Image: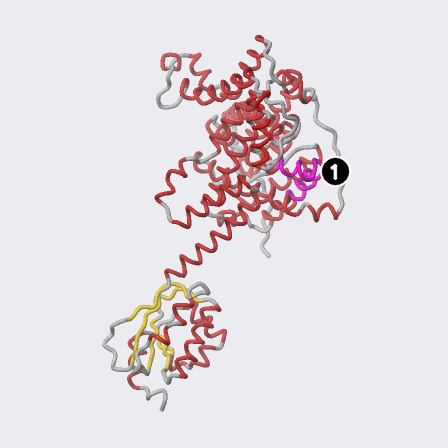
Amino acid sequence: MNLQRFRPRLLDSLHGYDRHRLFADLGAGITVGIVALPLAMAFAIASGLKPEQGLFTAIIAGFLIAALGGSNVQIGGPAGAFIVIVYGIVERYGLANLLIATMLAGVLLFAFGLLRLGGMVRFIPVSIVIGFTNGIAVLIALSQVKDLLGLSIDKLPADFFSQIGTLASHLDSFNPAAFAIGAGTAAGLFLWPRLWGGPAPLVGALTAGRAGRIAARTPGPIIALVSMTALVAWLELPVETIGSRFGGIPRALPAFDFPEFSWATVKQLFIPTLTIALLGAVESLLCARVADNVSELPRHDPNQELMAQGIANFVVPWFGGMPATGTIARTVTNVRAGASTPVSGMVHAATLLAIVLVAAPLASAVPLAVLAGILLFAAWNMGEWREFARLRHFSLGYRTILLGTFALTVIFDLTVAVEVGLVLACVFFIWRMGSLFRVEPLETGAPAGVVVRRLYGALFFGAVGRLERLAEELPADARVLVLEMHQLISMDSSGLDALEQLERALARRGIELRLAAPNEQPASLMRRAGFAQRLGDARIAPDLASALSASTAAPCASA
């Protein structure tokens, strides 16, 4: 077996590394580290965890994914796509089992990369990816309604309809101040790029000056976090903060702590483990492909990337962290900030660590409504909402898979959605491929009693019905049936069985079957199965003309 060689992209990217690239990576890493600060805390809180668990994941996993991965610029850490998954696992199995499932998922991810399965992620149809991505975005937004409205709810249930019922039953605890802060945060994040950047900045006069350039480069989430936190403190608004709910963030990394492990627990965690591993693989490789498209750097190595993701997810639970994967928003920010090597990702992790060690007490004053507004903005950017409007341009199968995956993700969970989506994709693919197979009459001027049919497409289990009916459709005076197979591109064992059944049905009616111009794959299958030998070389011609000539010279099959 040809296994993947473990060679991080960092080793290759440091060839010819100079001071200019170092400064570019330092600037990009610091920028992304600042951007990651509010997101890491928000993702952890939305997942039902403490904010420091998101920060520790961003630090440890971010460093390992950058140092050991297969991409020059990918930034790893907690991701919005995991919020729904992690919240559901914690709700159902508890925090300790989340850590075990994350470790096991890390082992699976490393195995995926070692066995060179990175390319198989591309086999997941885009309709499924869009469906579950938009579904996760809806669930993320729903999970933030509690903090956005300032509702007095101890813990939201994981089920979609239960969440809606719980939110509706607590609307009497609505906090106008929290809503104003959260809505203002989300609105500010939407307006910030339009005010200071983009093709048509609204504040055009300022963007040309030094202040405008600084403002345009400052990440919106940091502006929102600092300004709204200061506003709440100044006005002494009655809103819940990180300190009031979690008691603040420790100014040190957590101690190494191996979760309690038993094989009985592993058996129960099979589905959560598989879900974390598959979602992590899909998200990280999609993120790496986006990075390839927006940069001019060498393309990523998907198998090395999966091995790095596996190592990170195996190590992070030892420090109480959550699942990690590639993050598109932070990776794109890294590219646009000028990063060219994995050094920027390592600097991003070091920047977060420095912030935790120096400024952790300040995080206690951050209002949860601000983090809710940031996550609502992240959920909006995460979803591909235009695809819903474009559905009318696509086939029924595409629409069914996308909408079905979306609905199942929202109502049930991601695992069910992907499983059903893949089944639907297979069913529609089989139906589509089966519809492409055709058996058509071919006018050749053949003598009376010689019928010629041309086979198109692929003769497989989903298309054998068209061939099985052929014997009954032949005219009463037929004595030879010639199947022209030049455009039959492939045939499986079910197709071969249908061909054998056809030959026997024709023989009972005294009709001889001849094959003309079979391609290599069908011919090889017929030889290996012994059908070609039973049929005889005389009845398999290299071209249609030879088959017609032999059919004219052959005696009647019933003689």
**Depth check: 212 or 163 in front?**
163
Based on the picture, tell me whether residue 474 belongs to the magenta stretch.
no
391 left or right of 320 in image:
left
Range covered by the magenta-colored residues: 86-106
Question: Does the image show residue 22?
Answer: no
**Depth check: 478 or 108 in front?**
478
552 left or right of 137 in image:
left
Residue 542 in the image: state x and y as whole percent. 35, 75
In this rendering, the answer to whether 475 lies above or below 383 is below
Image quadrant where one finds the C terminus: bottom left
Q: Amino acid at mark 1?
A: Pro
**Residue occupying the point 46% across, 28% down:** 336
Question: Does the image show residue 25?
Answer: yes
177 left or right of 463 in image:
right
**Picture colour scheme:** secondary structure
In this rendering, the answer to whether 371 lies above or below 538 is above
> Looking at the rendering, which quadrant does residue 178 occupy?
top right
Residue receiving disc 1: 259
**Residue occupying the point 44% across, 54% down:** 428
In this rendering, the answer to whether 186 lies above or below 392 is above
Assign a secondary structure to mark 1: loop
Residue 532 in the image: state x and y as whole percent. 44, 77
